[in-house]
Image (cartoon, rainbow, N blue to C red):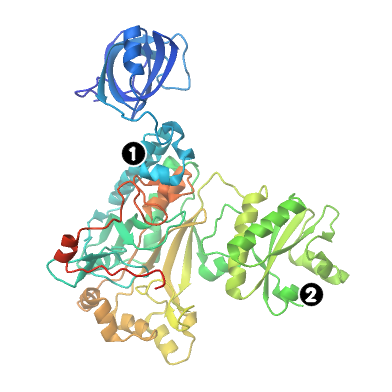
Amino acid sequence: MTQTKYRTHTCGQLRMEHVGQTVTLAGWMENLREVGSNFGFLVLRDFYGTTQVVIETEEMMEQVKALNKETTIAVTGLVRERTSKNPKLPTGDIEVAPSQITVLGRCQYNELPFEINYSKDAGEDARLKYRYLDLRNPQVKRNIVLRSQVVSALRRAMEDQGFLEITTPILTASSPEGARDYLVPSRKHPGKFYALPQAPQQFKQLLMTSGFDKYFQIAPCFRDEDARGDRSPGEFYQLDMEMAFAGQEDVFAVLEQVLPPIFAKYGAYHIASQAPFQRIPYFQAMEEFGSDKPDLRIDLRVKDVTNLLQNCGFGPFEGNLVKAVPVSGCKLTRKAIDKLCADVEVQAGQKPYWFRVDDKGEIVGGIAKFLNAGPALAAQVKEALSLENDTLVLLCAGTRSQVWKTSGVMVKLAGAQCEGHLDKERYEFCWIVDFPLYEIGEESGQLEFCHNPFSMPSGGLEALLKAERGETDPLTILAEQYDLVCNGVELSSGAVRNHDPEIMVKAFELVGLGEEDVKAKFPAMYNAFCYGAPPHAGIAPGVDRMVMLLCGESSIREVIAFPMNKSAQDLMMDAPAPVTPAQLEELSIQVVEHSEEE
């Protein structure tokens, strides 16, 4: 039912069958086009669409001319057929001849910060400061509507899979989960703080120990971290889920049932991977794609040519790993290749190199002279890489981490810029599996958890004991951890959880933390596991990133109703903002200002 106190129909509802009826519409005055002193066309817009209102009297023209655009009005009048129809509009066959126009909410400003229908062309600061105007743009509003539809569909799908929605606390204890906490001072307990949850990780595992079998939640998460195109600072939402008496494949089976229909129905592209998604081990992904977030729509692969080219006489290759990315059928000009290489260097921080096989089968350009120094090497390179005519070959050299990063950027940029290598109109999912449990920290130089300290080590306790005894390198221990990736975007990380206190303590001992440290950092979870915990596993795909992909947007802020800017500021509400001395005193807090030198 659309009829309310202020309207009988919406601005997107009227059709030819309503001709001859007297209706009342309410909305924003989007535009007024004057044809004469007593004739003009007014466009009325509400949430549902637009309707043309024809002004035909001098008195009514004077009334609407006195109103600024974006004033809210109610229009009562007769629906009639348009003489000049607009097939692009759902309401393009009709118009309303008003008998009465009533002002409901006057816009007091002659000038708007931006034209509503072109708000996406405005600067980001203006859009965020006047977000309530930005959201009046139907194109912007569609993203928020789609987000609501997707969240609703996710809920239905999870319930159909037998999951129970349970909300977990927002005010909780600070815990080391990889990012900075947002802290909330306690008035009743001076000097102590709550933390906003970075994720419901511990609570959902505690639910499994409590006897709940399948949990899910559209969970708000809070992390004090920097913004990126695919990450919003401050808060974000995820489809959080956990399953008891379950392993990796059980989690995969759920999401492989839930996600493809939603992506196919609501996505900008209507083709989505079907179950089972491709499983790619972490080290294979890094070697073949140069990334643990591969975009499977790109058909390019990284090739190892270290043994072939390390001693070819080209200085940067000597003593380094060398990787190649062949790009067949590439017609880029020399200028375009130079631009591509420059873009790779900016993103990767390492200089790429290149050569090409021309239409006669000759190796030319870039480092070609080092490959043509002897006929044998050129032939070996062409055979090893299966190079056809008109193939561009991008190369990089360095340490393992350097060539992984650089080759990944080369695949991504060449796939996008060289025609025929990116099948854009689809959603391609994959699972990245078999992550390393440990790594050597860049800053500490010591053994650290690579990703999630709650992950079960592959091989269980025995794998940890072998590493402790020095029989194996702890860096070779894999974790039962997995990432879900779609079109080169990481949607989620998940894991089979380390639910055994003995295994948990041993895993932490290898990074220099003992049983008492585990008890101190994770008291509730450790104690709960000591009362008998079921094996359990889970994952938490990001809702914001998911909707960003579905909308075909490149920035996550386009799919959040009221996002912060890149500096984690809410320009519309002016947050964060100072508070009064009385508020600080009540919370037993003193603000200390640091000088710029400090």
Q: Nearer the viewer, residue 294 or 365?
A: 365
Q: Is residue 283 above or below residue 418?
A: below
Pointer 2: residues within 10 angstroms few (<14), some, or many (20+)?
A: some
Image vertical order of residue 6 relative to residue 238, above or below? above
The image quadrant where one finds the N terminus is: top left
What count of labels does the image hold?
Answer: 2
- Please tell me in which quadrant of the rendered image residue 173 appears: bottom left
Q: Quadrant of residue 508?
A: bottom left
Three-letter code for the amino acid on which mark 1 is drawn: Tyr
- Identify which amino acid the numbered label 2 is placed on: Cys
Element under disc 1:
helix
Q: Position of residue 413 (x, y in %)?
A: 62, 55
Q: Can you tell which quarter of the image residue 191 is in?
A: bottom left
Q: Residues within 10 Å of mark 1 (few under 14, many from 20)?
A: few
Q: Please determine whether, in this image, residue 276 is positioned above or below residue 203.
A: above
> How far across and down, in percent of the image, does residue 506 sit?
34, 85
Callout 2: helix, strand or loop? loop
* Residue marked by disc 1: 132
Q: Quadrant of the C terminus?
A: bottom left
In the image, residue 88 sits, relative to residue 472, either above or below, namely: above
- Choose between 181 and 364: the one closer to the eye: 181
- Kindly identify which residue carries mark 2: 312
Mark carried by residue 151: none
Q: Nearer the viewer, residue 359 or 256?
A: 359
> In this rendering, does residue 112 appear at all?
yes
User: Where does the image place residue 61, in percent across and percent down from the top left?
Assistant: 35, 12
Residue 393 lies left or right of residue 282; in this view the side is right
Q: Is residue 272 left or right of residue 345?
A: left
Residue at image position (35%, 7%) is: 58
Q: Earlier in the sequence, mark 1 or mark 2?
A: 1
